[in-house]
Image (cartoon, coloured by chain):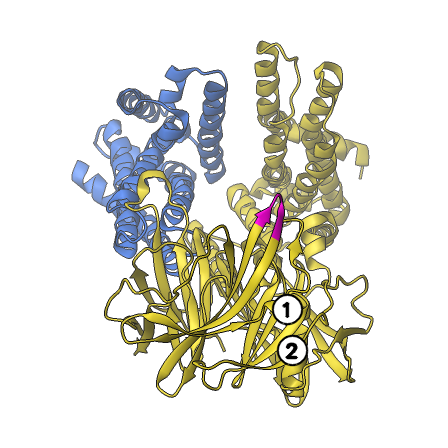
Amino acid sequence: MRVSGIIHQQICQLKWHLLACLGLIMVLPIEEAVVNLKAGDGFFSTNMTFPAIMFGPLLAGLIACANVQGDLNEKRYIFWRSKPANVKLLISLKFFIGLISSLIILACPVVFAFLSNIIWNKEGIDRMFFRFYVPLPILVAIMTYSLCFASNVLVRKTARAWLIGMLMGCLLLVLPFMLPLDYKDFVSDVIFLPFGFYLAIILVASAAAFVFALYAAQHDWHLRTNLKGLLWVVAGLVFVLMMLFSSQIANIKVLHEKEIEPSRGRFRLDNAGDSIVFQGQSYIDIDKNNISLRNISDNPDDRITYMPRMKDYSVQIYPRSGRLYKKAGNDVYSLVIYAYYRREGKARVYEKVYLRSYGFSGKSWIPVCELDISDCLTNRVNFISVAMRIAMRLIGNKVVTCVNDSYIVVDATNPGELKRIETKLDVLKKGRPFFHNRQKEFAIPLVPLEEIGLEERIKLSIDLKYQYRSFKSAIHESSVVDVYDDKIAFFLVTHEDIARFDVTHWDKEKVYCKFSAARPFTILEVMTTSHYSDGTFVKNGKLYSFLNDALMVFDIRSNRRIRRLGHFVRMNYEIEDMAVLEDGKILLCVRRVQDPRKSSPNKRKWYLYLLENPQ
Amino acid sequence: MFRMLLWKEWKENLWKLWFCGAASVVFTIMLFRIRIIPDFANCILISVVQIFAVPVIYSLDIFSGEISNRTIHLLFKIPVKRWMLFFSKYLVSAIGIILIFLISGLLMELMSGGREARMLFLLKTNSLYGMAGLVLFTWFCAFGCQSRSEAGSLVAMFGVFVGWGIVLLWSSLCDVTWAERFVPYSLILMRIIKVGPVGTAFSQILAFVAVLVIACYRYVSIRRYL
């Protein structure tokens, strides 16, 4: 076999296809360059180079099909197979000639953009563009070329082979996103450095397709297809792909959806013993998966808080929104901390802090007891005008209140008569640990309170360490700590993963913890949610993490360590608050954020969603 | 005789209606049930896929099938005018395309029930995409009615898609408003590219009729296969 002759024959065979592809791929950059020239900027192209090279994979597939089809249509195939030709060599030569030709064509818009920018663009060349956006389409083009080549060897129909090759290419590129692959560095590999991940797929797929094409040609494999069957298969595959997609990010069933009246501020769901209080005004009743609201008071104007104002003073409230409820017999009380401050320039000067309890009188909420805890204000001035750190948690009948670096334990057996039982001033150390190396064992200061049990102290210590902040903390209603089988663990959510830390041991002053496992987020999870630990809590062996438009539920007690159970995403909606009911169902309070221009009758709407808890 | 031709084409292309209809219905139900993205965005997503997929499926073998199977010889021997042959094919495809968009639009309305978008908004949007799809198919007929293979038809259809895309880009960049009105995509991008609906509709109808006549003429003048 004359290799040079085959190369010449291949180039002659492909020349019109190559010219057509060259024309197609260069239209957009040249058009942009002409427009730029007309505008007086110079004859160069930048923005249109990317769309042009995005066509590259499609055109490479087209060249591959044209490359094969010429010699595999019936008559020519019989002719050259009757000669003593080395099939593998011939197919290899065809493959590489077509590949090199298509790469040259793909390089044309890039070279044009590069040179025209150097020569005519006054602002210089955008090197980042060439570094980050150019290599990926070219690599994908190599893969689609190989796949189309292999499928055409098998199918021997240009259009069908092209469709099959493209579909396989799409599958290979999309499927890894759909599968819950627990790559250690999945996020960094795929989001920030996509080439490392894709390079493996592209190279392996290309090599496999090439080898397959050689074997198919050698053994004269021929798959007869019909258009109808092919399209049904394609549709079936797309359907399966979408099912995989939805099973990854939309697998929590909505049991009921109820629109609610708009209100000022964020909507809140608070636990009051065995019932959920909505917005401080209504109990939420769930009957056969139906949500209904029952007013606490007959008068809907009654507000849950009665907040005495003081002239020239502003007030900081904890909980910032929502309330901490305590049931005593049939009576419901709510507990709130008020901190009064005045402004001096940019600084906030705190004067008084009160813990107040409110009782429901039958018509409205009235203050029933007030405890002055201003002695916690060992440092009254916040120079940078940020809110003071305040938190509280109800443990049995005791309320632990934290103000700045001090603790007070209050007996709330009868919330109408709050009694201080323990005070510790300036014992809480500030700061949130940032892990330089989370594999190393670390210690958390143990809350030095004697009036509460050790397990609760450890839980509180961990929650205070990671959730005690000035702007927002949900310590009164949730915890990131899980106690199970005499083991204590806690969970932190970062942008990359959910990490589990086990409490290994403790002494009188410190709790010692060690990193145990991490569950990296898949690309879909990262794309649909931006994670940090504000909306993260543990309840009944499950970790709930919600932010903006997404909620994720994880199993944290299975043998497979942290395992995702469910993912709920509703773009354009914002989750304002959530609660887990006694029977495990999830209640969400969501707000529709934005509507597409004139398509919607109302700009904003609020809903309560009842969701099935994924198992 | 024309009715017989219509019946023949209807039977031959019924699977396309089934296929596109079933796929549209299944994907509409799925997307509107899981509601990851808003209803309006779901409608746009489905319509965009439909505008490219449905005309491609209809165009793949509507004309080239007869030529590659060599049944065109038999067809041309039937004592009917050739324009009737063309229009029987075109009408069946057009009815199929319209039905598919209508079904999916109605289903979208039914499933959304005005929960996020105004009533009939989704149907209107999907129908506009359907009209654009039909216009694109008509343009394909002018270019691809003489193609001998599926590959030829596919290239012609993609040529139409990409070609009008380039015209749209050029006319938008250079502010050539009169050209924008002739682009089939302007039917669905009226708000973005700011072309008047009356002018666009008039230009589209004008172009539609002209292209249909050209397509019919090209089909009638097929000589080389006889």
Can residue A560 be seen here? The reply is no
Q: Which residue is mark 2?
A: A423
Magenta segment boundaries in residue numbering:
A343-348
Q: Position of residue B5 (x, y in %)?
A: 22, 39
Query: Label 2: chain?
Result: A
Give me the residue at 66% from left, 67% from top.
Answer: A466
The tally of labels here is 2
Q: Does residue A84 sit above or below A431 in this rendering? A: above
- Disc 1 residue type (three-letter): Cys
Question: Toward the viewer: A436 or B57?
Answer: A436
Residue A166 shows in the view: yes
- The image quadrant where one finds the N terminus of chain A is top right
* Amino acid type shown at disc 2: Thr
| Relative to A216, residue A37 above or below | above
Which residue occupies the extreme front position in the image?
A: A311
Report x, y in % for residue A30: 61, 19
Which tint is chain B? blue
Instruction: Give coordinates of residue A183: x percent, y percent.
Output: 70, 63
Residue A270 versus residue B183: which sits nearer the camera?
A270
Which element is circle 1 on?
helix
Q: Is residue B209 left or right of residue A397?
A: left
Report which residue position mark 1 lands on.
A376
Q: Residues within 10 Å of mark 1 (few under 14, many from 20)?
A: many
- The chain carrying label 1 is A
Q: CA distance from mark 1 to mark 2?
A: 9 Å
Residue in front for this viewpoint, A294 or A421: A421
Q: Is residue B33 left or right of residue A387?
A: left
Both on one chain, marks 1 and 2?
A: yes
Q: Residues within 10 Å of mark 2 (few under 14, many from 20)?
A: some
